[in-house]
Amino acid sequence: MDKIIIEGGYKLKGSLKISGAKNAALPILAACLLTDEVSVIENVPRLVDIYTMIKILKALSVKVDFNKDKIVVKPGKFSRYIAPYRLVSTMRASICVLGPLLAKLGHARVSMPGGCVIGSRPIDLHLKGLKFLGANIKIEHGYIKAEAKRLKGNVVYLGGAFGSSVLATANVMMAATLARGKTVIENAACEPEIVDLGNFLIKMGAKIEGLGSNIIGIEGVKKLKGVKHKIIPDRIEAGTYMIAAALTGGEVDLKGARPEQMGVVIDKLRQSGVVVKNKPGGIYIKRTRRRLRPLEITTLPFPGFPTDLQAQFAAFLSLIKGISIIREKIYPRRFMHINELNRMGACIKLERDSAIIEGTNFLSGAPVMASDLRASAALVLAGLVAKGRTEISRIYHLDRGYERLEEKLSGIGARIWREKA
Ligand code: EPU
């Protein structure tokens, strides 16, 4: 299997372009199923998860072309309604075809997504929401079997033990666009990716209000049309490169990054002493102070601190003198990166859902293993600043969520490359 090799200790300097957001593109591609007409999605990142979603659309007999960063989806009168285990088992986000299939065809069979290395990831809220819209749902032979002649609007409270759910909101919002009457989603997710999906649906002809707030209203329509849409930039990719710049003592311009999607991340970096400036069309980041300050961070739904940047911040804070604390309130067991960071010399202890980080003077390069997408990103960040050589194996996780990672980082001065096994 391929490995990523990093020679640590080089400052990053220059500019790089942020790719389109994976977590906006995935539900938007699923939303293309809501119409027979052709949709054109631009600024789509070339990532393994995107290819998986394309395979799912093709398994549903939908035609899909991916050229450069543009995907053309031609559903036509597609009639297949089964999202098979072999695809769903590789990507949990496949669940977001459930709502569109049910709304468009009146029935869907989607394999139950399995467990996941970042912790238990139930789908009860997805099913609750669709049941409230009148769907008859059974779990049979590992598949979700959902049926409804025409869905009917309703008021649905979508909060779980850990607050709102991003993809449950996406699923119910998509299904409600073609339901009879009005749906109100209470405790809806406010994430920018949900706003992007909502804006796409509105272009298609959906009637949606309250996007970006925790109450979303959807007035069902009979039909939606195919449209053209450009995916928003990836705030998690941007956050990862902001930390790379701060960790290595560099100076980087992130073209396309949107400060309004990243308030808490910018605030935390500034609190620690990193210079972050909003520039027209991007974000500029520079580390001037030799000594940064430790932080306390709690992950929460948007606009709170994103769980998808928790691992990367753990790498960052492991080199800041003093005690930092990270509380993980979305996935309390999402700490697979901690042991690997400790193998590189970090001093991090776990207590329940918290990581207690005692800053050390340096990390040292080591062979490490990626366990999930964001944990892998944390190891890359640690490798960029560690003394000597870091070898990261199981890098297929990185290819799920970071477009041309080695190329982008080498372009601003990192010594990073991929070795084929
Ligand atoms: N939850 C439930 N029941 C449900 C659904 C979720 O209890 O039916 C719980 C989850 O277990 C978790 C919390 O609600 O504790 C929030 O999970 P959410 O449903 O919001 O996660 P998701 O929609 O499955 C998306 C992203 C994740 C990201 C989370 C949280 C996509 C494709 N995935 O997942 O991204 O961590 O929101 O922000 O949008 C990643 O990109 O690395 C990634 C894991």
Image (cartoon, rainbow, N blue to C red):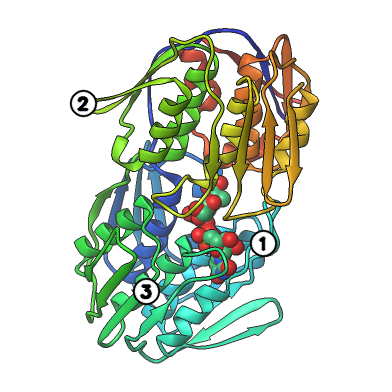
Q: Amino acid at mark 2?
A: Pro
| Number of the label disc, if any, that sits on residue 134 | none
- Residue 337 rendering spot, x and y as whole percentages: 70, 37
Q: Amino acid at mark 1?
A: Arg
Residue 91 as seen in the image, left or right of residue 104? right
Dot 1 lies on which element? helix
- Image point (52%, 22%), residue name: 244
Location of the C terminus by quadrant is top right
Which residue position is annotated with label 3? Answer: 186
Residue 42 as seen in the image, left or right of residue 340? left
Q: Of tags 2 and 3, which is closer to the observer?
A: 3
Which residue position is annotated with label 2? Answer: 280
Which residue position is annotated with label 1? Answer: 86
Residue 170 as seen in the image, left or right of residue 308? left
Whichever of labels 1 and 2 marks the residue nearer the N terminus, that label is: 1
- Tell me the CA gap for discs 1 and 2: 44 Å
Q: Is residue 307 above or below residue 270?
A: below
Whichever of labels 2 and 3 marks the residue nearer the N terminus, that label is: 3
Q: Is residue 343 above or below residue 60?
A: above
